[in-house]
Image: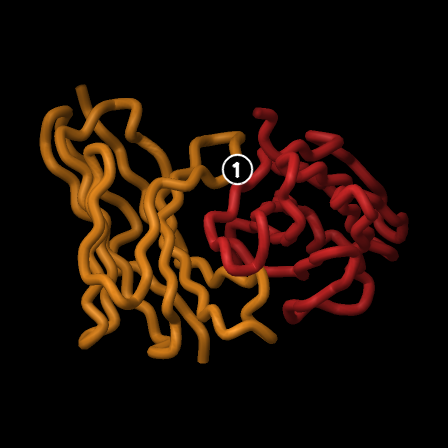
Chain colours: A red, B orange
């Protein structure tokens, strides 16, 4: 079966712009989590969605937001981009919150210039 | 606070050797642990997981050991191969719901290099 699909793979944006990243979970998976990966901070949790509801949120500013659609696909948005937002953004999906075997996508590499 | 740390940032081994990657965690409430492998340009790949009611779990060529007394986790890779070269992350979660939903706390990672 298809894995977790993230689009686009690469993105270059200018400071002050906004960006939307997309994640399609494995078919049947209803939980989607987002992470930011940087060399300095490692992998950090952004938020988690289940059945179109955000159930958990990490310690990121309000510029970072997300949503989930009825087909479990998820998007995250970053507004007013800063240079420090340059990172690999990863999403992971799992069947339900009890199933912790999160499967990750290959990520979207965002570069802010 | 919540943190998962690794003792060694790099590990270099010869092909065929056994590798051991260590991880210390600080949250005694964590009840689920995962090891991931991340290759360049790819997302983390699930290797093996273990719940806190176990102290050992084996997979294909890999074994995870959990010592809750000292809050230590290790990944053993048998007969390490060049294809095992990657960054390895441990991650933890406490499955009580609420603030744990979907939230894995990752260690910094260990770079494993396997020499032919």
Which residue is denoted by mark 1 in the rendering?
B43
Q: Is the residue B40 above or below the residue B97 in the image?
A: above
Quadrant in which the N terminus of chain B appears: bottom left
Residue positioned 77% across, 62% down in the render: A53
Which sits in the foreground, A31 or B21?
A: A31
Residue B30: where, in percent of width, then height?
Answer: 39, 71
Residue positioned 58% across, 48% down in the render: A95
Q: Is the residue A49 above or below the residue B26 in the image?
A: above
Quadrant in which the C terminus of chain B appears: top left
Residue A6: where, in percent of width, then height?
Answer: 69, 34
Name the side, left or right, on which B36 lies relative to A91.
Answer: left
Q: Is the residue A7 above or below the residue B68 in the image?
A: above
Instruction: List the single residue furthest toward the top.
Output: B116
Question: In this figure, what is the number of numbered marks?
Answer: 1
Residue B54: where, in percent of width, then height?
Answer: 23, 62
Which sits in the foreground, A60 or A48?
A: A48
Instruction: List the single residue furthest toward the left.
Output: B17
Residue positioned 30% across, 51% down in the render: B9
Residue B67: where, in percent of width, then height?
Answer: 19, 67
**Residue B33 figure quarter:** bottom left
User: Dot 1, how many residues are within 10 Å of its Cα: few (below 14), some (14-19), or many (20+)?
Assistant: many
**Mark 1 belongs to chain:** B
Name the side, left or right, on which A112 lies relative to B54.
Answer: right
Q: Is the residue A42 above or below the residue B77 in the image?
A: below
Name the side, left or right, on which B41 lies relative to B63.
Answer: right
Residue positioned 70% across, 57% down in the render: A50
Under circle 1, the secondary element is loop
Which sits in the foreground, A9 or B77?
A: B77
């Amino acid at each position: 079966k298809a894995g977790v699909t993230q689009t686009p793979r690469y993105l270059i944006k200018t400071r002050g712009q906004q960006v939307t990243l997309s994640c399609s979970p494995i078919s049947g998976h209803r939980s989607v989590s987002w992470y930011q990966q940087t060399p300095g901070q490692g992998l950090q949790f952004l938020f988690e969605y289940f059945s179109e509801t955000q159930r958990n949120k990490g310690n990121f500013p309000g510029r970072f937001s997300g949503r989930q659609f009825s087909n479990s696909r998820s998007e995250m948005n970053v507004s007013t981009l800063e240079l420090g937002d340059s990172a690999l953004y990863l999403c992971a999906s799992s069947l339900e919150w009890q199933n912790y075997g999160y499967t990750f996508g290959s990520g979207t590499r965002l570069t802010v210039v | 606070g919540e943190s998962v740390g690794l003792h060694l940032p790099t590990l270099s081994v010869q092909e065929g050797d056994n590798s051991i990657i260590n991880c210390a965690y600080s949250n005694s409430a964590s009840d689920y642990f995962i090891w991931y492998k991340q290759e360049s340009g790819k997302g983390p790949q699930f290797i093996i997981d273990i719940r806190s009611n176990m102290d050992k779990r084996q997979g294909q060529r890999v074994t995870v050991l959990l010592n809750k007394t000292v809050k230590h986790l290790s990944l053993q890779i048998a007969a390490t191969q060049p294809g095992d070269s990657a960054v390895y992350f441990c991650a933890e979660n406490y499955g009580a719901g609420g603030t744990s939903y979907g939230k894995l706390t990752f260690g910094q990672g260990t770079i494993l290099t396997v020499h032919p």
